[in-house]
Amino acid sequence: MLLSQNSNEPTPNPKSPNPPKLNNTQEPGSNKNGTNRKVIINLIVLGILVLVIGGFFGITNINETKNEETNSFSGLLTDIRAGKVSKIELNEDKKNLTVDLYKNLDNKKRDDVEVKTYPNISPEKNTTALENIKSGLADTNVKFGSGDGEIIYAEKPIPWYTGIFDAGFFQTILILGVLSVVLFLIIRRLGEANNRSISFGNMRSKNYDDSKAKKITFADVAGNDEAKQELFEVVDFLKRPDEYITMGAKIPKGVLLVGSPGNGKTLMARAIAGEAEVPFIYVSGSEFVEMFVGVGASRVRDLFRQAKKKAPCVIFIDEIDAVGRQRGAGLGGGNDEREQTLNQILVEMDGFEPTDYIILIGATNRPDVLDPALLRPGRFDRQITVTAPDRKEREAILRLHSKNKKFASDVDFGILAKRTPGFSGADLQNILNEAAILAVREKSKEVTDHHTREAIEKVMLGPSLKSKVITEAQKKLTAYHEAGHALIQTVIPECSKVQKITIIPRGRAAGYTFNADNEVDPITRKKSEFMADITALFGGYATEELIFGEVSTGASNDLQRATETAKNMVTKYGMSSLGPISFDEGKGMSFLGRDMMDKPSYSEESAKKIDEEVKVILALCYQNCKKLLNKHIADLHKIAGVLIDKEVIEYEEFSSLIEHLLPSKKKAPSQV
């Protein structure tokens, strides 16, 4: 590959025939219903207070704002004798009289009156105010209705809403309303703070509900048959515990899923949730750790408390390395909060109190950082490695993810599997998704072989930079660089065979040579295969020096990979003249604080010998590469010329160019 220049409680009986059904129950410890009742009661009390106080102020304001004069009954009789009365009204309570009096007796007008109020006119007996007035007039010489005045008896009730529209009462209600809202917000905020302080240590776990989620089973997981078999035993025990108990077998308390990112660890856990007929609780490892001390341990206790109530039960902790890292390994003595959380997990899994019928499943891609106490039998009894798929498994994964997609007849999933060595399940799913997106972009009715090949290259290197301006000199340099790689890989039998060459820039790569996967993925590799890989990596570097007399920055990645391979041969695999010795200490990552400041276990003299051996291997492969290029210089020019002209050489055309170079004793690779 040529890089561009800028790249550098007690447990329930498991024999119960009807295990508890899965549902999203409310978290223990939450008091949501009680809180709602308290809020409703507070609102009712506040409403009653507002009505009582508002009614008091309203009645007071009615009496005060009318500016009506209050007089005695004797005064009323005096006004009647004088002929001043124009109108008498009896209030709704039949105790107060409102009397309209003429202001000018010489010119009596109904609109020129003053209003007086006579309270407590009626006695306690059931007599009307009119009878009281007539009784009062009987002792006088004044006849009823004498003079120009007119006595009118009329019962006029006061509407209940009169005080509401009074200005003073409205202001009072407004102030009380604002105060009530403020008081309500304060009470609610205090209640929320109290609930948070109580429930802060509760675990925010989630319960798997197959009625709401898309159910996934082991049939939806392609590859890793051995790992699925191990996990199926766990599911089978939860379904048939009696048979295992009768045989004297004990189910593992913990199962640790280990594997590189994208290989399907979480997918395996989802399959267990779909297969198991018991409650399934899942949570992320990062949800245990908070800024407050003791919260993590409290959440662990709450998590297992929930599980004990639902036993038999499965707990899944994703990315368990977030809380399970080795204790005392930090540079500052470790994180006490994280260690307390881990200690509580250790106690809950295998402590003084048994936790039968609770299975803990953890997933991580960093098993080397986990605490040894977490990995011992009795806690995580089983460690299941979820490996990267081989070619057969990749084909099965591609077929699985091809559902609900329209593929043309020229798409061969077997060929796609050969063109994707080292790809994980997530990568393969991404390839088919990118191919479908590309088909839609081109307004194609089906996903064709062209779309899948373009998707593979896009996932590996990035989108093609067809609009990027490339000079003829740069184009020629890239063509010879990739031609050198392709030629060396062709003439060395141990190398993977070339399937496509391109000099169209993608991502940071100015060009790339695609290789086919081996018929069988090797479990072990020989020294000759490592030497062949290093020689092929020098193909572009040596070609630049041979054709142009100088090298470019495009071979930087090739040199880095070649040096790393040679160093591993010397320090790990004993493939050098130093003999059967390994200098690899396997200290792990430096952030764990493992001997970061310590010196290597081998001497400086050994370090020099290691450097010398690495140089010897690199020099030997480089010289061999130059010899092969000089021997087949004509084929090198031929391949480079076609690349300069067409920019892309597919397998069919490349096979016709180098057919005479294929090893006679080895069958040519099938078309991919």
Image (cartoon, rainbow, N blue to C red):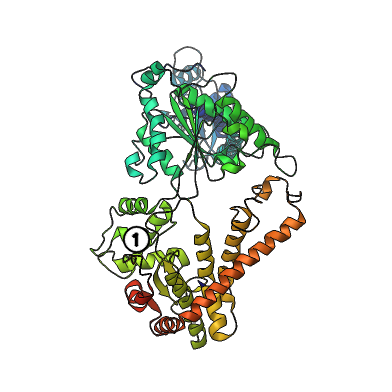
Residue at 55%, 82% in the rendered image: 546
Residue 8 seen from this side: no
- Which image quadrant for residue 63? top right
Residue at the spot of label 1: 416
Disc 1 residue type? Answer: Leu
Q: Please, is residue 135 above or below residue 108 in the view?
A: above
Residue 118 vertical position relative to residue 126 in the rendered view, above or below = below
The answer to which of 139 and 278 lies nearer the viewer is 278
Q: Residue 88 in the image: x percent, y percent?
A: 47, 30
Q: Quadrant of the C terminus?
A: bottom left
Q: Nearer the viewer, residue 600 or 574?
A: 574
Badge 1 density bin: few <14, some 14–19, many ≥20, Cα 10 Å: many
Q: Residue at x 53, y 58 (%)?
A: 527
**Residue extending furthest toward the top:** 125
- The kind of secondary structure element at disc 1 is helix
Name the foreground residue: 477 vs 179.
477
Where does the image place residue 20, in percent across and percent down from the top left? 38, 24
In the rendered structure, the answer to whether residue 339 lies left or right of residue 501 reads right
Q: Is residue 628 visible?
A: yes
